[in-house]
Image (tube, rainbow, N blue to C red):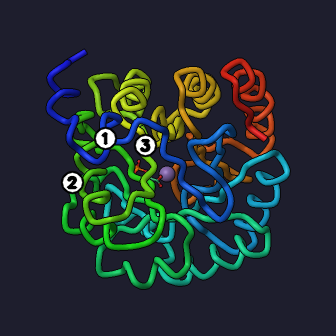
Amino acid sequence: MNQLLVKENSHLLVSRAMHPQNTQVNIKGCIVGGEKTVVVAGPCAIESEELLKETAFKVRAAGASILRGGAYKPRTSPYSFQGHGEEGLKILARVGQEMNMPVVTELMDSQDIELVVDYTDVLQVGARNMYNYSLLKKLGRLDKPVLLKRGISATIEEWLLAAEYILAGGNHQVIMCERGLRSAEPWTRNTLDLSGVALVKEISHLPVMVDPSHGTGVRSLVNPMARAALAAGADGIMVEVHPHPEKAFSDGPQSLTPKGFSQLMRELDPIARACGRRVK
Ligand code: PEP
Ligand code: MN
């Protein structure tokens, strides 16, 4: 481990040296960074109210605490589905309320901040925006939890310093989220950096989540990597679930079915217990 990194950052707000106890982020009573390992689940994108409702109902029944769904999708191709925008946000807020589940959604453009903030309980900064410092500064001025994804090839230091931008503005409700790094490996979408999870937990007091869906891009790898994430000390996981992955507008190949998600929850339970935590 690079000791210099820890030393040089010891004065930072994200550093454990500055704040030895674990930070707990309270999302409408759901505590991230506490005893319970928090599971966020839902589709990649909000496609329709009906589909989101069905997904939310099933993931909640299986034990998910927070519902995810994208209204603004950062797609590689401009011709791919870009998300339903404000209409999607309205659907997410309605379904979250109906199911009594807090919701998380990605904010792509700082111009949309005032709009998105009213519809969501957690603002997600996507991997492509981790370096968007003007966006991070604006999030620092809010009183709203932020889920900060690690950049596509960001170092731990860059990721922690991105979080520092938000804390420096006065908003200490930051959840880090490892979602895999671009590597030379073509069989997976990204390479999930679980040593980075343990390292961030060591250096920082902020809670860390893991997204094994984007972290692998492969459905069959989601469960093993989610289990490994818990064993590595993750405070939560975020997984994509779709009732009909083969028909999903985005990220079908990495989406679990609701049945697969129930299986995942069963697999996570003994691992959480072995780590002195619980998933439900
Ligand atoms: C997502 O979670 O919907 C997403 C686009 O993830 P990432 O920013 O990690 O690619
Ligand atoms: Mn996705």
Please determine whether, in this image, residue 155 is positioned above or below residue 30. Answer: above
What residue type is disc 3 on?
Leu
**Is residue 80 found left or right of 8 in the rendered image?**
right
Using the image, tell me which numbered label, if any, was put on residue 206: 3
Q: CA distance from mark 1 to mark 3?
A: 12 Å
Under 8 Å from ligand 1: the CB of mark 3? no
Residue 187 in sight from this viewpoint = no
Residue lying at the far top in this picture: please name it: 1
Q: CA distance from mark 2 to mark 1?
A: 24 Å
Figure quadrant of the C terminus: top right
Residue found 42% across the figure and 39% down from its top = 205
Q: Does label 2 or label 3 sit earlier along the sequence?
A: 2
Within 10 angstroms of label 1, few (less than 14), some, or many (20 or more) residues? some
Quarter-of-image position of residue 166: bottom left
Q: Does label 1 or label 3 sit earlier along the sequence?
A: 1
Residue found 14% across the figure and 23% down from its top = 4
Quarter-of-image position of residue 36: top right
Secondary structure, mark 3, is loop
Which of the two marks, 2 or 1, is nearer to us in this view?
1
What residue type is disc 2 on?
Tyr
Q: Which residue is mark 1?
A: 18
Residue found 53% across the figure and 53% down from its top = 25
Secondary structure, mark 2, is loop
> x, y percentage for residue 152?
29, 42
> x, y percentage for residue 225?
56, 25
Q: Which residue is mark 2?
A: 131
Q: Say which of 25 and 243 sits in front.
A: 25
Which of the two marks, 1 or 3, is nearer to us in this view?
1
> x, y percentage for residue 230?
60, 27
Under 8 Å from ligand 1: the CB of mark 2? no
**Is residue 254 found left or right of 182 in the rendered image?**
right
Q: CA distance from mark 2 to mark 3?
A: 19 Å
